[in-house]
Amino acid sequence: AQTVTQSQPEMSVQEAETVTLSCTYDTSESDYYLFWYKQPPSRQMILVIRQEAYKQQNATENRFSVNFQKAAKSFSLKISDSQLGDAAMYFCAYRGLNTGTASKLTFGTGTRLQVTL
Amino acid sequence: NAGVMQNPRHLVRRRGQEARLRCSPMKGHSHVYWYRQLPEEGLKFMVYLQKENIIDESGMPKERFSAEFPKEGPSILRIQQVVRGDSAAYFCASSPPGNPAGYTFGSGTRLTVV
């Protein structure tokens, strides 16, 4: 079964600084998707960034980028120029492409990010 | 184009009552997924439905929980005889056919059992 591990329950970053959130996963599949979701206090699940495993190039969305290490099964999120609005829970998630795994996202337990002045 | 609509946003039920949670997918999305988020935890998959069909219910508790997605109308997650442990946020997501990465989440329903 696929598992996703986020080993940092809480992180803190100063405004305008850079922070990296860690995520590791375990799977026997060769093709899959990885995601980072942001959950602010409003509870809405907001997709931050997505990575296809077959792509070697790391995904980037404005101030958000990932470091995808397929062999190490690692998928970290880097937030540059942190803003107060980045404060939220961040969840790493996995979605396979095979029957039985393509229909569901497997989430980690989340990292609570605080942004300080 | 409205997003995934869930209602109610908050639901309070006494132990032993029934809870009905509704989810209207995005326009053009025919696949619906339900997830449960316990306090301070990540989301856990419950069930995946297409119109009139349950495709994968591997995450559904065996008793008291059921889900449907009729030909007309929203998808319904039904919890019978609720217990305190059912208190959680329940999220619905939808995706279009043939696009496994095209997930969109609703804002969730927070169920509180008193």
Image: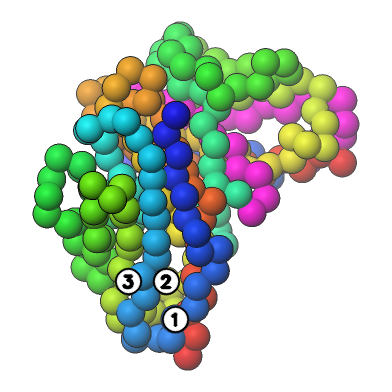
Q: Give the residue drawn at x 72%, y 16%.
A: B63
- Mark 1 highlights which residue? A13
Residue A65 on image: x %, y %: 24, 64
Q: Residues within 10 Å of mark 2 (few under 14, many from 20)?
A: some
Quadrant of the rendering where the N terminus of chain B is positioned: top left
- Asked if A22 appears above or below B77 in the picture, the reply is below
State the scheme by which the image is colored.
rainbow
Q: Residues within 10 Å of mark 1 (few under 14, many from 20)?
A: many
Report whether mark 1 lies on the same chain as mark 3.
yes
Q: Give the residue drawn at x 82%, y 31%.
A: B83
Quadrant of the rendering where the C terminus of chain B is positioned: top right
- Mark 3 highlights which residue? A79
Question: Is A87 included in the stretch rendered in magenta?
Answer: no
Question: Is B24 included in the stretch rendered in magenta?
Answer: yes
Question: Seen in the image, is B51 located left or right of residue A63?
Answer: right
Kind of residue at disc 1: Val
Residue located farthest toward the bottom when viewing the structure as drawn: A117
Report the chain holding disc 1: A
Q: Work out whether residue B5 or residue A116 is closer to the camera in this orientation and state it.
A: A116
Report the chain holding disc 3: A
- Secondary element under disc 1, as helix, strand or loop, is strand
- Mark 2 highlights which residue? A86
Q: Work out whether residue A18 or residue B6 is closer to the camera in this orientation and state it.
A: A18
| Mark 1 vs 3, N-terminal side | 1
For marks 1 and 3, give the CA distance: 10 Å
Q: Give the residue drawn at x 28%, y 50%.
A: A72
Kind of residue at disc 3: Ile
- Asked if B108 appears above or below B66 in the picture, the reply is below
